[in-house]
Image (spheres, rainbow, N blue to C red):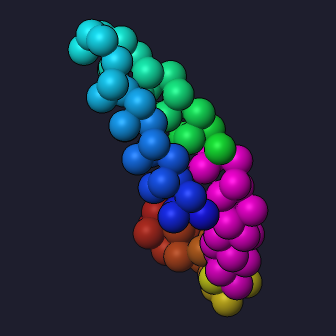
């Protein structure tokens, strides 16, 4: 996918260089190149982002499952001893 994006940016760069004014060249580069390409790359990479998010959630769940639950009776005893 990156080689296609690189080729597209090159073609649009060549198109923008041939424009008559600098403003038209910048507008061509942004409107035909940068904006559409950023949208396409964002959509094409959404499965990768989803997979990374699921992996991060799985790791977080495993870390939370590995933590022992605090024993509330010991906490209550400790707080009573500190109060006295």
Q: Nearer the viewer, residue 53 or 26?
A: 26
* Image quadrant occupied by the C terminus: bottom left
* Image quadrant occupied by the N terminus: bottom right
Q: Is residue 51 magenta?
A: yes
Q: Looking at the image, is 72 positioned above or below residue 33?
A: below
Measuring from the top left, give residue 35's x and y in whole percent.
52, 30
Is residue 1 visible in the rendered image? The answer is yes
Q: Looking at the image, is 49 positioned above or below residue 59?
A: above
Q: Quadrant of residue 69?
A: bottom right
Measuring from the top left, give residue 42's x and y in whole percent.
62, 47
Instruction: Name which residue lies at 67% across and 89% down.
Output: 66
Q: Nearer the viewer, residue 53 or 22?
A: 22
Q: Looking at the image, is 17 positioned above or below residue 47?
A: above
Residue farthest left in this picture? 22
Q: Is residue 18 magenta?
A: no
What range of the chain is rendered magenta? 41-62
Measuring from the top left, give residue 48's x and y in whole percent.
68, 66
């Amino acid at each position: 996918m990156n080689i296609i994006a690189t080729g597209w940016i090159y073609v649009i760069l060549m198109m923008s260089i041939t424009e008559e004014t600098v403003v038209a060249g910048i507008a061509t580069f942004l409107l035909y190149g940068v904006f559409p390409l950023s949208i396409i790359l964002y959509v094409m990479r959404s499965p990768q982002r989803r997979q990374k998010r699921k992996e991060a959630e799985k790791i977080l769940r495993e870390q939370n499952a590995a933590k022992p639950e605090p024993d509330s009776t010991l906490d209550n005893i400790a707080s009573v001893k500190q109060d006295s």
